[in-house]
Amino acid sequence: MPLDSLELRTSLQRVLIGLILILVPLTVFGFYVALQGDSQIRQMAGENIRSVTRTSAELTSQFIAGRLRDVSLIANNPSIVQAVAAANQPYERLSEDAILSKVGALEEKWNNSEGDVLAKNILASDLARQLRRMRDLNPLLLKITVADSSGATVAATDKPVHYFQTDRGYWAVLYAQGQGAIHVADVRYDEQNRLPYISIAYPILQEGTGRFVGAATALVDVSPLFAQLNRQQIGHTGRLSLVRDDGTVIQAPGVTTSMKIHSEEYSAIRDSLGTLRGRETGYLFTTFSKGEPYLVGFADAGLKDAFPNLSWIVVASQEQREITGPIRNVAAFALFVMILSLLMLSLLAAYVFLHRRQKIEDIETPEDKLHPTAA
């Protein structure tokens, strides 16, 4: 028998049953797989954004730790410790009230001509020149001031706003009952130089006794940290910001601290930050006020316990449609194929049913109609 005459014959009913058994499970399974892919992509995107925020939080913590070491080297410099100890000697026989009176009188003259003479002597000292040399070697240090135990300025790279330091809020924390403690102020923004900076005050302790004898205070440029955070890439719609625990944005693309902008992302993650499970998860999907769904990741910089003013949180956000767009297209196509397959099977089933009914009607011949069987 020639191969070209080989024919395969089967009924439409069998074809229909075969198609139903093959196409329906395949299309349903394909749609299910697409939906599962959507879930997995959301999870992978969440883990990725959590990794970005945790890396950025660690980077922030390391940057602050590095600047603390820089100021520590100043506070523990032997020549600076000796100079501060020498500056304290005139106060040894004076009462606390007498010291406050003497230093207060100099504070009143600080911003007039007499104060200019005193400031000139302070800025021209060997110790001041040494401080300027330290600043030149470390451009992140903007200004350095060294004060004795009474808070009076001993040396500085630039003329301080105040000669007497103890009337400022940080001094009580810095003094710490004579034991000395580090104080770090929150970010401020220098409008003139367009630089964000923090203030780090480090206690100077007497060698051997560990007694508080003075303090070294430095204004530190944090713009390199912000530049590193801005370089983090999270897709096309993602952005990363540094916020306080009250929601105020410290750093974000096109935002400065002085603007006092509130983070909409922080409002979404505030409840999660208050739970252990939420902090461990590190991300969530939420909808903002304009109705756009977003993925938001977050990580605490871990600085608040040691430095209450640095309650910083790294927050990142990305549009959900950018994350799930490709797989949603696949899911939509799978749904379309499933509906189309079911529609085609329905049409085929209707055709088979009508064709089978027509054959049953054809069984009765015209002769049967003309000569009906007698009852």
Image (cartoon, rainbow, N blue to C red):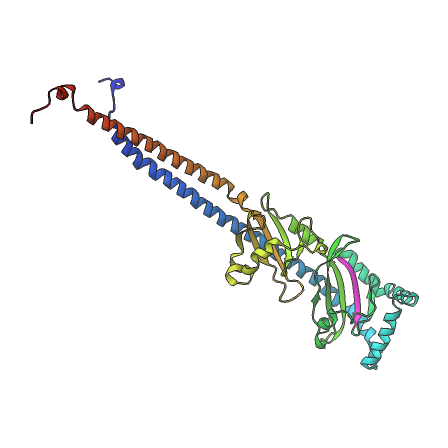
Camera-side residue: 325 or 164? 325
- In the picture, the quarter occupied by the C terminus is top left
Q: Is residue 361 magenta?
A: no
On the rendered structure, is 5 left or right of 53?
left
Q: Quadrant of residue 95?
A: bottom right
The residue under the point 83% across, 77% down is 100
Q: Quadrant of residue 159?
A: bottom right
On the rendered structure, is 17 left or right of 30?
left
The residue under the point 57% across, 59% down is 270
The residue lying furthest to the front in this view is 375
On the rendered structure, is 226 left or right of 139?
left
- Highlighted magenta segment, given as a residue range: 141-148
**Residue 38 at what x, y percent from top left?**
46, 45
The residue under the point 55% across, 63% down is 274
The residue under the point 58% across, 44% down is 235
Q: Quadrant of residue 334?
A: top left
Looking at the picture, does residue 257 appear above or below residue 305? above
**Residue 101 in sight here:** yes
**Residue 82 at what x, y percent from top left?**
80, 71
**Residue 57 at what x, y percent from top left?**
61, 57
On the rendered structure, is 87 left or right of 305?
right
Camera-side residue: 71 or 367? 367
**Residue 79 in sight here:** no
